[in-house]
Image (cartoon, helix red, strand yellow):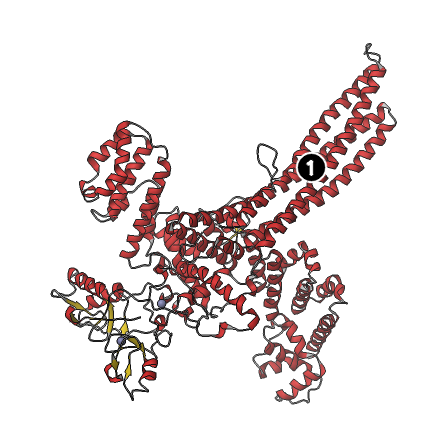
Amino acid sequence: MSKLLPIIETEFSKIYSESSSSQDALIRKCPLETHDFKAQLKKLKAHLNKHIQESEAHMRGEDKEGDVKKLRRRRELVVEKVNKCHKQWDLSIKKQIKQTSQQHARFKKMVLNKLYEFDLDQICINRLPQDSKKYVDKAISFHISRYNIGNLDIRDRGSMMDYLRNVYGVSEDISSKFVEMGQIVQDMKNGNPNTCLDWCKQGSLLQFELHTLNLMQLFEKGDTLKTYRFLTNDVTVNSFKHRHKQVITEISPILTRLILGKPIMNIKELTQKQLEKCISLFTQEYCSQNNVSFNSPLFLIILSGVIAFQFFIKYTSIRASAHVDWTTENELPFDVQLPDFLSYFNPIFICPVLKEETTEENPPYALPCHHILSKKSLDRLSKNGTSTFKCPYCPVNASKSKTRKVNFVML
Amino acid sequence: MGSLMNEPDTDFHLKLNEQLFHIPHELVRKNVKQVQKLIDRETAVLQKLFTEMNKLLESNTLEQDKLALVKLNDIIKHVDHIEKRLNKRGEEELKLLNRIDSRIKFFKELEESKASRDVSRLTEWYQKFTNLLVGDYLMRNSTVRSNSSVPENISNEDEKYWNPGVVFLRQQNLKTLLDYDILLSANRISKALTESHDLGPLLSWIGENKSFLKRNYSFLEFEARLQEYVELIKTANFIDAIACFRNYLLQFMESNFADLKLASGLLVFIKSCEYNQIMSQSKISYDQERNNNIPNGKSEACFTTRDQIYKHFFHKKVLPKPSLPYSSNDFNLNYCNKNLDFERYTDLLDEKRWSTLNDLFTKEYYSMYGISHQEPLLMYLSLGISALKTKECVNHRVVISSDNEKLDSFIDENVLTSNCPVCSEEFAPIAKNLPYAHHTESKLFENPVMLPNGNIYDAKKLKLLATTLNRKNLCSLDDGKVMDPIDKNIYSESEFITMYPT
Ligand SMILES: [Zn+2]
Ligand SMILES: [Zn+2]
């Protein structure tokens, strides 16, 4: 559980005023009080003005009732009030700004100082080679095409590619791979799943989910008759045929509600979820059909980098006193435990004797007992092929001549 | 709460992204300081106005009261003006607080995704995070364009400048998560220095942040003004150069005496060159024939390399002694080094000073907001590549082709292509010189079987491949036969040897 988040939230809320019903930043009290001050002054100005007019009338003798004493007292009152409200405003606004600054200083002390632990510039990471920029830009081009093309509001093929080139510098050979995907995603977002239905395979899960989406969208609009007709006529029987389980969990509840004439309270949210599900299913199928990776390489590397960072920082702080510079080494000095979906791109074989990963220079060899060792440890055990040796894992004896070089291939 | 994919906890993320809170807070603090100043100044003004009004009221005559009324009206106008300015500052602060708020929400989302134990939800969060880094990278590196050149669908409310980073974050709905204004203005000032050799944006930034620079004992202003002076000299604008020296450089006499001595020397030096140039027009044309590299005629404006300037000065300095042998470069080099601080002048005139100035600027700018100089995207990429890079990534596999082109291309594109991001065409060249991951355990596949050729495969996948190849009519394999995709030979399942890799 995060310890810092609750602290940040509490301290952040203190930058807002607590009392008032509508939450507002502390600093906003300054203009608000000034506004009140202005209103008061305006009122008092009107009083003073009235006083002057009445005094003039009195002097001209027009106003018989006018009482000099009364006029004088009112004048005193106005003068007194003007000064009083000025003093009040002056004091209050100064207090207000002081309080606000104090609260900000507190935020710095309570939050920012606690967040500050790593100075990224002091963290010594292997810099990418000098000429990396063009490759990074290309990776970004791919990433943007993959994830952002469905967010554009242009649909025409040529315009989409022009846009990506002009704004992001994406070359046509990258953007062209994603145009159709972008168009279909845009259509789905705009409530038109038909282009996707045309694209997908008959009887596929995607087709089923799209029909479900369509159904939910009709239901959301509240058009019972249309929904009914859609269910009975339009939906090809095919797409529901082999999906008994999904029909029961997804379609039946809607159908029941439809028959009962009852609304589904969170239909909007559900439809949105269904839309996202369809988009994700579709992009997955689209990418695999077109031989492009579903997750951009950039994303997978960044994710691995985030995961590696904690191991890296732990290692750096341990080694800080030892002054060991690992960046010049050929291999990271620590083991980054990546999740499975980031671990099985290539076969990794660690020689059980040497505890080293096999390489082209030190390839794996199979013993007659079907255990596998690296060439180096084989040479060592067989004294460079001059003697037989016992397999380190079973009682079988082996000679170097009876081993063979092997090659792991991931399919 | 454990992690779902070995990812760090939320607090670690918060610490890594401290700048996301630091920057808006710094901006808020600046804004509050402005309000403080505004209030200090304006309450004093009002105090004075009130005193004047009270003085008028003291005499208690109708005439004076009328004047006091006018005064009160002035006061109201002034209060109105204060209110408007406070309102503007208040709204500014609300916008900045909104940034902090959206960042708190962003990390709460992370915390909630972790709590939900839903990997796809967590993956989505990391996708957003990656997009944020991409936005940051684009913001820092892509050319900033002014709003007059906005293409359709991008134009936006009140912002003067934009670049692809801004557009990307807007399209991803992540705009409040990054301090685009801060990054953009750094980028704009930098690019002006390094690309158009324009000091204007830097000088106005210096003007706005004088007290910060002073507090940090920064030489930025001095270096910028020195550059301004040098540029004026390069274009032979001596009058403005002298004015610049007087107005801006003299104040650094104590702290930068040696530099200033050199700077004033440069003026004398170049002027004397000018003088000599006029004195010996005919000689110059002769020299130009001798050496095509000599910049012609009005010269000073186009020194770009040390060589050029060297040639330029050398042939002129020796003019008064026409008997000297021109061909002897060694002699002239010595001559110049002895008599003039030649190296140091050329350093001063060197184009490299622009990038040095830019480095100095970014250092100050980023430290002011606590922004890292290193780009986060590149840091994560460097570590991520190393965490993923296996020895296999750089191995070049020899694949034997068959006489069936269709089969070969299918296998090449669909079977043997690795999904490894480090092996992708974008990252393979970058990864070449970065360290490998460190592994202590093998990571292989299930049911490893060896074919007679020594290749070890996942038995199930090999059989599945056979079915696929048959279905696609790429070859016809009998029951119990498989094809090795690398040497394209056909083997029988009975030849499979179960392996026991540890
Ligand atoms: Zn064995
Ligand atoms: Zn790889």
- The quadrant the C terminus of chain B occupies is bottom left
x and y, in percent, of residue A305 in the image: 44, 62
Above or below residue B262? Residue B10 is above
Task: Say whether mark 1 is within 8 Å of ligand 2.
Answer: no
From the viewer's perspective, tell me whether residue B220 is left or right of residue A230.
right
Q: Answer few, some or many: residues within 10 Å of disc 1's Cα (few below 14, many 20 plus, some between 14 and 19).
A: some
Please, what is the three-letter code of the amino acid marked with disc 1?
His
x and y, in percent, of residue B49 in the image: 79, 35
Residue B74 visible here: no
x and y, in percent, of residue A22 in the image: 57, 33
In the image, ligand 1 is in what quadrant?
bottom left
Report how many numbered discs are placed on residues in the image: 1
Q: Which residue is mark 1?
A: B81
Report the front residue among B426 and A323: A323
x and y, in percent, of residue B134 in the image: 46, 57
Tag 1's secondary structure?
Answer: helix
Report the front residue among B158 and B295: B158
Above or below residue A294? Residue A276 is above
Above or below residue A359? Residue A175 is above
Residue B234 visible here: yes
From the viewer's perspective, tell me whether residue B160 is left or right of residue A47.
left
Judging from the image, mark 1 belongs to the subunit labelled B
